[in-house]
Amino acid sequence: NSNSNSNSNSNNDDPQRIPKRPLHNPRLSVDSVSIVGLGCSSFSTFFWSDDDSTKNSNNGQDFTLANLKEDHPVVQEWIETICYAVTKAGINLLDTAPWYGHGISETV
């Protein structure tokens, strides 16, 4: 279709890629950054209630960086969300910090 927007995808199952802005810093390993970032505090126990901690425990243990398991269903969900944001939406700005679950979000 000659009237279609060049930024739209032909596959309706994929979201439009997030636009990027150029970076002008030769010390960085990327030359552009997505205009929308992915906040990663939710990829940890940062916002969990006591009920969440009990429901999602690691075989009765607290969910900590020391016992973080890649095959845990919650961790798998976090990984799938990050992969979708990066590969499908084109987000390359991940906002994380050491205090988000005491390093869990950075590790995920």
Image (tube, helix red, strand yellow):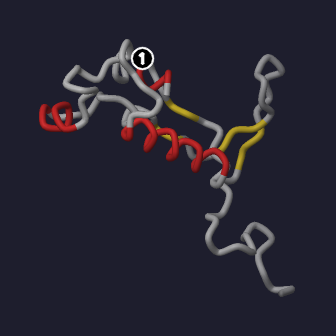
Q: How many marks?
A: 1
User: Residue at horizontal 83%, vertical 87%?
Assistant: 1
Quarter-of-image position of residue 29: top right
User: Badge 1 local density, few (<14 within 10 Å), some, or many (20+)?
Assistant: some
- Residue occupying the point 76% across, 33% down: 23
| Closest to the observer, 31 or 53 | 53
Q: Position of residue 103 (x, y in %)?
A: 42, 17
Query: Taking 94 as reference, is 92 left or right?
Result: right
Question: In the figure, is residue 45 to the left or right of 94?
Answer: left
Q: Is residue 99 above or below residue 4?
A: above
Relative horizontal placement of residue 70, taking residue 41 as reference (left or right): right
Task: Identify the image quadrant of residue 53.
Answer: top left
Q: Which residue is mark 1?
A: 103
- Check the image and name the residue furthest to the top: 66
The secondary element bearing badge 1 is classed as loop
Outermost residue toward the front? 59
Q: Amino acid at mark 1?
A: Gly
Task: Name the residue: 16% across, 32% down.
Answer: 54
Q: Residue at x 42, y 25 (%)?
A: 69
Q: Is residue 105 above or below residue 10?
A: above
Can you give x and y, in whole percent of width and height, for residue 56 in the image?
25, 35
The quarter of the displayed image where residue 62 is located: top left
